[in-house]
Image (cartoon, grey):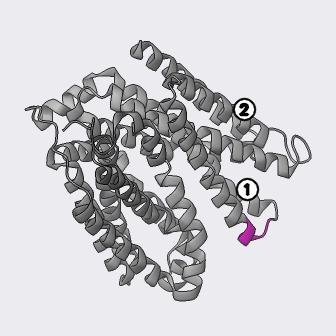
Amino acid sequence: MSSAHPSPATRHAAWFVFAAGVCAALHVGKLPPAIGALREALGISLVEAGFLLSLVQAAGMAAGIAFGLLADAIGLRRSMQVGLALLAAASALGAAAESVAALLTLRALEGIGFLMVVLPAPGLIRRLVPPQRLAVMLGVWGTYMPLGAAIGLLAGPVWIAALGWRSWWLLLGGLSALSALSLRTLVDAPAAARGGAGLPERLARTLRDAGPWLVAGCFALYSSQWLAVIGFLPTIYTGAGIAPALTGVLTALAAAVNMLGNLGAGRLLQRGVAPPRLLAIGFVVMALAAGAAFAGSAGAGLPPVGRFIAVLVFSGVGGMVPATLFALAMRLAPGEDTVSTTVGWMQQLSALGQFAGPPIVAAIAARAGGWHWTWLATGAASLLALGLAALVARRLR
């Protein structure tokens, strides 16, 4: 289906796709505020809590490209509906769980549902909006994860304190079911591109082409350093003596400001700014801001307020990277029938980056006796990403 002349109703339908992505991201972000309550109610250890945090990413790390391939095969809207149904069912069952094993199993199922929602979304948005609005809407789409994380970090503690973690699980399960219904009733299913290629051929075309590898590699290098910095902020601030309530607000703000970069990148892409230039700006600023935030031991470097501003710049300007990569995935996929497969490969390497980045930064901090060498890890990742951005520029030429 061509997206050259979508109806006004179709254009509004793209917002329901975005809302579905935010709903899926809430399931990723619903756990951190509940860890304390889960440990008290079910006796979960810190190690088990760590697995609960990471299992939702395990499916992406192990088989992101496979789920992208599945979405291209069964239909983009149908894939999102199935994923939301899985999230709703797993969350509802999780609310009744009485064992750690049950929660772990359902968390893995949520990871599958999450992938089936977010991987086909960019391709579906592409079919729902006119070409001149695509870059802006992809910039909006790039905010689904930080928005979901920020809502979870801010609303979760309040809800859990008042009504308990089980009702928090039920609430998000209900939102997922409602989102699935809205996709079915309010979003037309544009006809899929008909390429006659089977699944193995589509997979081979995607992995043989350099384009998907370049955008996926950039995403991995971005996500590894972003999660390492944002993920350890509560630990860093608690160690600095900041109150837990303020720590949550500061971390949520650092995650939420990432949305500004995504939205800004969408606008700049619409105005014709070259994607490799936006990638270069994003990665250079991330490297410099991380240096300003972490370089220098206690008593040296910037004061605490200056360091937090540097973290905001790191996350905010770095937000230009994911929006730009989603737009590049549309252009560098081997064909329209492999867009979700390409996004799946991006998700798979992004999950790998999220898996590897925090332990590397933690190991450096443990060896150095503090966080003042964190900028070395983030700077190295940015430098490698700049090399990939240069290759993207050559490919676009």
Q: In the depicted view, which residue is nearer to us: 342 or 76?
A: 76
Residue 316 at x, y percent in the picture: 64, 44
Q: On residue 131, which mark appears?
A: none
Q: Relative to residue 322, is residue 366 depicted above or below?
A: below
What residue is shown at x 55% (from left), y 28% (from top)?
279
Instruction: Give, as a three-letter code, the residue at label 2.
Output: Leu
Magenta-drawn segment: 242-246
Tell me residue 68's x, y (percent): 26, 44
Q: Main secondary structure of the magenta part?
A: helix
Question: Is residue 14 placed above or below 382 in the rendered structure?
Answer: below
Label drawn at residue 288 = 2
Decide if residue 369 is in sight here: no
Image coordinates of residue 37 in percent, x first then y, are 55, 80
Residue shown at 43%/45% (left/top)? 351
Q: Is residue 255 above or below residue 318?
A: below
**Measuring 70% from the left and 42% from the top, which residue is drawn there?**
313
11 vs 33, left or right, is left
Badge 2, how many Cα within 10 Å: few under 14, some, many 20+? some
Which residue was labeled with disc 1? 236
